Amino acid sequence: AMPVDEVVLLHTESFKHQADWLQKALDIHQIKSRFEVLPSADDMQILRDYFIDLYEKLKAEQPNAKLMCNVTSGTKPMSLALYEMALMTQQDGTEAYYQNFDDTLSWFVPGDRPRVEIEDKIKIKTFLLAHGVEVVNQPQSKISPQWRPLIDEMIDGLSSFQKGISTLNYHAVLAEKQPNLTSPDPADQNNPHFDALVDRLISYGLASWQGQHIKFSDESARFFCAGGWLEEYVYHTIRKMMSKSKRIQDLNQGVQVLSMLDAKVKTVANELDVIVLVNNQLLVLECKTYKTDPPNVQNSLYKLDTLAKQMGGALGKGLLITLNPLRSNDYERAKLYGIDVIQGDRFAQLENALSRHIY
């Protein structure tokens, strides 16, 4: 809600690539920006003199310019020196503000203003760019609308289908690398839970028996059976919640991203099941129907912890949605990472389970 003519990005040499990320985000909104290299990260006197010189340079360029100083980030000496400059020049209209963890701004100069809410205008693509992550592919849903009733059947009958779903996930993952999308392992046809589930898949045209092996009708069907149905269910549950909460700014599914660790180097970060931006905070969700063996769970928790911090900053949050319950030590590991877990017995009331993160 603060219209500006230009943003001055203050950075040390070692943080040039972070400044580049911010400039890319500003470019999306056609906001002009420039870089200014700080001479020190921790010398108060040098920083104080530098900010006064910078102030005089900017005023010489535009005598009527009004400066608004963001003292939130950087080292403490940087913030203090910038705050001092704002105090010294407030008679010329200079202001200084600080972004709080509750998504509000506090005005330090002048100090007689109330906190203000930060407007929830930013979208996920811009948010990620500001954190050095570029969206490279955002595919359409792989789940056919004709299969939506099957998802509802699986949720409603989860108590009877649950033991068969993890087995289905196993065969669907194995079939991914097979040219005919057939699982190379024989399926357990003596498992009534699994047999009942396969019967439902066959009725919807997703799979068929090929001797003792499961064959999937196409890649979309294989993805559905490998856990895509849960990702779709979570995504559509949050879409419904968007109509009830203005806090939800943006929502994406199956997004592929590149992590820009260096200005000249890009590395693949990952594919994200579901990401949602709520009140300017990023929530990264992993949706899993695998058997919760330690390697599977530990990999998912590590991925969530890493990506939530990298893409969401200090307030980024990870959430694991898993069909099967975790072992006690994995729950403890999730708590240490600050990752919440929603498991299968709460799927039927998923909106309620997500409400503490969304509403």
Image (tube, rainbow, N blue to C red):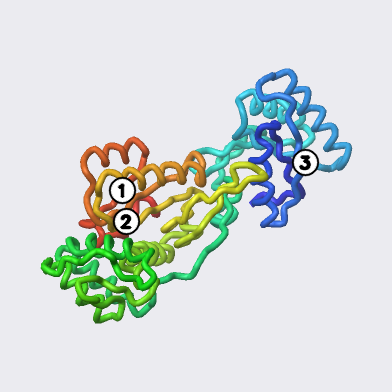
Q: Residue 296 carries which label?
A: 1
Per the image, label 1 sits on a secondary structure element best described as helix
The answer to whether any part of residue 111 appears in the image is no
| Of residues 181 and 32, the one drawn nearer to the viewer in this rendering | 181
Q: Give the image location of residue 72, x and y in percent.
A: 60, 34
Q: Mark 3 points at which residue?
A: 66
Name the quarter where the C terminus is drawn. bottom left
x 32%, y 41%: residue:
334
Q: Give the image location of residue 340, x and y in percent.
A: 33, 46
State which tag comes first along the sequence, 1 or 2.
2
Dot 1 and dot 3 residues touching (CB under 8 Å): no
Residue flagged by tag 2: what amino acid is it? Lys
Answer with the quarter of the image where residue 15 lies: top right
Dot 1 and dot 2 residues touching (CB under 8 Å): yes
Q: Mark 2 points at which residue?
A: 288
Q: Residues within 10 Å of mark 2 (few under 14, many from 20)?
A: many
